[in-house]
Structure formats: C-alpha cells, structure tokens
Amino acid sequence: PRREVLLELAQVLGVYVPQFYEGIPPRPIVPGVPERIRRRVALPQPQYSVGLVPLVETVHDRLVMEVRRGCTRGCRFCQPGMLTRPARDVDPEAVVEAVVQGLRKTGYNEFSLSSLSCSDYLSLPAVGAELHNRLLREHIALSLPSQRVDRFDEQIAAIMKGSRRSGLTFAPEAGTQRLRDIINKGLTDADLIRGIRTAVQEGWDKIKLYFMIGLPGETDADVLGIARTVEMLQRECAALGRKRVEFTLTLSNFTPKPHTPFQWHRVDYADVQRKQALLQKELRRLRGVKAHFTDIRFSILEDFIGKGDRSLGQMIERAWRAGAGMDAWWESIDTAYAAWVRAYCGEEVDPAADPVALCAHLPIRELGLEDPLPWDHIDTGIDKKWLQKDYRRALEALTVEDCSFEGCSACGICGPGFGHNIVIPPPPVPPLQSKPTPTPDPLEPEPPAQRFRITYGKTGDLRWLGHLDLMRLWERACRRAGLPLAFSGGYHPMPRLANANALPIGQEGYGEILDLELLDRPEGPLTPEKLRALLSEQLPPEIPIQAVQEIGLRDPSATAAVYAAEYQLTVSCELPKAICVSGMESSWPAWVTQILDAQEIWIEKTSKSGKSSPFNARALLYYLEFQGLTPEGSACLLYRGSCRNDGAYLRPTHLVQMAESLGLPHWTLQTAKRLRLLWEHDSSQQ
C-alpha cells in the first residue's frame, strides 16, 4: 500500500515525506520517521554526465561536465553555497577522459566545466590545457560559467581561447569594499582591476558584470559605487590603449534565501525601487555600458515564496488557477503578478497598482533571530547558531575565510555524516599546442582531402525540424561517427557542410542533397559505402541516407548544381455536388493539359522584404502529371520545376496560383512532398 511505501521511503537518508509532519517547524505525527531530515551528500561522478542529445537547439546546448561540487566561499546571500558543503573536487584525469568520451558520444562542438565556483577548482588550468591539446583539430569550444575575477589569470584565459570566443562574466555583486565585506564576497578593487585588465589584454572586449541592490547594510553610497566601479574599470581598460570595452550590467534585487545567514533580513522594496532610479540616473552618463534591471515584482514574488511555509501550497494552486505560469519570463510578469496578488487578496485589490504598495498585502515574513523557521526540520549540516553568528558578523562587516584553503570556520558541516572538503592538488599545466597550418596565415583553413555528396530524406516527425537544427544534427552525427570534418577559415570556423535548397518547416523531402568535406584520415580515404554506414548508425531513422557519391573538390557546390526539383502534391478542389467522382477524374487531366498547353502563365511572387513582382511561371514548369484521386477525393499531382539558386524556383504554391490565373476552379494545397532534387552531372538520375 502507498502509505507503507512512503513509510519505508522516509527511512532513506535524504528523503522527506511531508504528509508525516505538521506544524511550524514541522514535527513528526507518525512514529518511526526521523525528527529532522538530513541532507544527503554524494561525490560528483563526471562519467555519468552524458545525457540525451536533443534534436533542436536548447538552452545550454553543450556537454556539461561537473568538476567540483560544493562551495565554501561563504557568500552570505548564496543559498547553494551553504546547501552544498563540503567542497568536493573531481580527479583531473577523470574529468579529461569524461569530456573526451562525452564529446565522442554526443557530437557536441562545445563543452562546459561546471561548478558553483569553477575558478576554485585548482586543476582547471591543467585540465583546460590538456583538453585543448587533445581536441585541437576538432574545433571544440570551452565554455565556463561565471568566473571568480580574483582567480582569472593568463592560464585560464589561454584555455578559454577556443574557436568561438564569447563574452566573459564576473560577479562583483557590490560596488564598494565595505558592502563586499558585509556579504563576504572576498573580493577587492585590486582583484577586480587585475582580472578585468587580464581579460582585455587577452582579447576580450565584451564583459558582463552582476551586481545586487538591497543588500543588508547598503547605503546610497554603495549603490552609486556600482557606477563608480564601472567607471574605474573603463579608465583602466582605456589605459591599455585598446578599443573600448563594452560592459553589460545585470542588476538584481536581493531577496533573502532560507538556510543562509541573510535569511533573517527583511527587504524594504520601496527603498530598493528608489535605489534603482538613483542608479539608472547615474549610469546614463556612462558610454559603452548597458544596464538591465530586474523588475521589482519578480523579487517580491521570489521573497514571498522563498519565506513561505506549508500553507503556501494552497496559495500556489489558487495563483495557478488565477492565471499564474511562466512567472520568471518578463513577458508574463503582468499576468503572473496579478494572479498572485488576487490569489492572496481576492478581487478587492487592483493588481495594476504600484507593486511596492501591493507588497504590503503579501505576507512576506519578518523573522527574528530566535524565531522558529518553517525549514528548521531540514538538516543541511550547517548549525543554525553559526548562521545567526555569521549574520551578526555581517552587520559588523567582518569576513570569514574560505575553509577549503584557509582555516576552519566551525560551521558544523565537517564530520562523519557529511564528510570533509576534498581539495585535489593541481597537476602541472602542460604547454598549449598550436595547430599546424598549411599557410603562413593562421586563419587559413586546413585544406579538405575528400568531398562527398549525400542524398537523404527528411521524413516523419523530423519534417518539423528547422534548417539550422537539421545542420546541427548532421554536424553532431559526423562528430559521433568520428569523421574528420573540414572547417572554414577566419575567427569563427564552421564545418564545411552545405545543404542545397532548405525545405520549409513541415514539408517532407525524400531526395535532399548535402555536401560534406573531410580532412585526411590517418587510416586512409573513406569509400562512399563506408561513409554511408558510419553516418547511418548516428542518424535517426527519419533521416535515411539514399545514396553517397564522392565528387571532385573543385566541382560546383550542391546549391549551384541543382537545377530542378520534383514534387508530389495532394490538391483538393471544390466543385458543384452534381459532379460525381468520375467527373472529377476526367476534370483533373483536362486541367493539367490546360496548364501544359499554355504558352505563358504570369503570377505574382513576394520577396522576403514584402515586394511583389510578376514572373512567367509556365517557363519554370518542366513536367506535370495527374496520378489519380485519394480516397478522400483529392488529386495527386506530380510536377517537376525549376529550382535554381538565382531565384528561378517554382514552388508548390505557385502551381496553385497558376491554376487560379487560368481561371480554373479554386485549388487548395493540402500536402507537398519533395521527391528529389536534380543536379547536373548526376549519373544516378535520368
């Protein structure tokens, strides 16, 4: 029975069954369940980081490899930093092998080394350099999460210089040293300047900085210090004599989180709103700076939910029924905030009113240091008295050292239940290898050795795959198959994969063409048969390969070689009820003959910019045939028309327009399937 299963699960370390507890803080109401639920601690296992590979582009569309679990920096606002102690490093050799194998299994062209504080993984420079050397020829990019600016140096910059360089992200959090000490950020102005100067000297010109407004002990001078800090960094960058660096600021509103020293702090959102306006005015005079302020309504909801107790569950349901959903998206904040306010206050409050005024209606808890907390029954391993003591230290601007590298702070986590910090000494950093180039110009690509033309289908559910997603699928299939892809040159090399005449989304194709260029293989050239076998193993069944031909390196591209396309259409036509099925069967051949007998059929086509222009569609129609009726009474038509790269392309919709231009009964295009593309010098086609 369900209840017995839940009772047994409640005995498992780390499992919480809420229905067996009541009160604030919750206490057991059935015998045999633990008084407090202890958090479970596990070592990171990078070998299990490889998951499903999506067929469409997703957020963080890359291989993510965990290198360090837990953070002991002790930032007083940071919930993950408190909930994931102790810190546990992964063996550097295990990381390298897991990344190399993961990239081979997934086909990703980018990977990320992930951690709450990636810069505190001391082996990061050595691991990054080793992976750079191993993946040198494959144009694999390394992505790192937000960096500790005080640890960003030439070694980390060197391993981040991949084939695609994105902007850098740092999180100073506060604009003055006093406030950074209050939040225990462990960062000085000198650290910040040194890190930014290093980034600029190493070639970065786009830097993102994260700051917070509304922190405990914050004054107007601290808020204006954000603008002063950015201004100082601009001066330091200008002194290097490089072009102006673009700074993007993300300015969030602080909300207290449970299980942190700041969980007892109450945010004054009217004051935060005033400080936002103050900082906006100050930042307007800075050139080359973009600032994004978090809508204060997000912060109010986050604070309200974050401090909620078990009774919040019913309100969540009421808010959902009132229209809340996708609340974290700025497009939805009006609807979401109105739903939350109505869920608590009813219809008597206008949700369009000032959010700070409405904030008074939401029961955001004001907690005292000695008050029982709704989450006191969760044992995170950190002693509550230590959190209280650290909150008092914060108000005095006293800092606590990082216990992974300095002395123990006596937070209570270390012991037999939760373990201890595992910090692995860094191995030597191997020298970075440079890719040999065939020409003096390092931006020149390595010349391809073989070129193939692949005929394939795009069928079933994958007909809804967009062109960019389709090309990404092909690249990943090639990488999983171990093919040495050739790349273009320049600062952003791209794989030399070229698809001829992309299909519209939703349309099936059975004779699509893809050109693929490969570099030399140590084991010798590939045969078309071997290439087909390798790729077929890595492609979904909805992308069948029909043929593979090796072509010359100087042959025209697939896009230039294609001259015609063959389609099968299903077309319906509304006729008077007096006309029977046999009449339809005789009418369609007559209509087809009428189209073929016409010397000219002029219709309008519209460009992407919306400009219309007439063209003779009949000149682009090479063949048209009526193939019979479907059981539903629609006509099956086969046509072959021009499909050239210069714009001379007869689309299925044009055929319907041609019938309308001749005055035939109205045709409705139901389905269109592209059977094949015809290209010059193709020996397999008639």
Image (tube, rainbow, N blue to C red):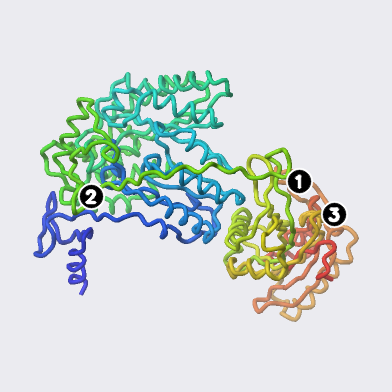
Q: Is residue 327 left or right of residue 579?
A: left
**Residue 43 % position (x, y):** 32, 55
**Residue 657 % position (x, y):** 76, 58
Q: CA distance from mark 1 to mark 3?
A: 13 Å
Q: Is residue 301 left or right of residue 113?
A: left
Q: Amino acid at mark 3?
A: Asn
| Above or below, 127 relative to 254 | below
Disc 3 secondary structure class: strand
In the picture, the disc for residue 638 is none
Task: Name the residue nearer the viewer: 527 or 116.
Answer: 527
Disc 2 secondary structure class: helix
Is label 2 or label 3 in front? 2
How many badges with numbers are in the image?
3
Can residue 77 be spotted in the picture?
A: no
Task: Name the residue nearer the viewer: 180 or 661.
Answer: 180
- Split into 4 quadrants, where in the image is the N terminus? bottom left
Q: CA distance from mark 1 to mark 2?
A: 58 Å
In the picture, the disc for residue 616 is 3
Q: Amino acid at mark 2?
A: Leu
Q: Amino acid at mark 1?
A: Ser
Disc 1 secondary structure class: strand
Which residue in the protein does label 2 denote?
A: 312
In percent of the image, x 38 and y 46: which residue is there? Answer: 115
Task: Name the residue nearer the viewer: 88 or 315.
Answer: 88
Which residue in the protein does label 1 denote?
A: 612
Quadrant location of residue 51?
A: bottom left
**Looking at this rendering, what residue extends furthest in the right direction?**
599
Can residue 485 be spotted in the picture?
A: yes
**Residue 516 % position (x, y):** 70, 58
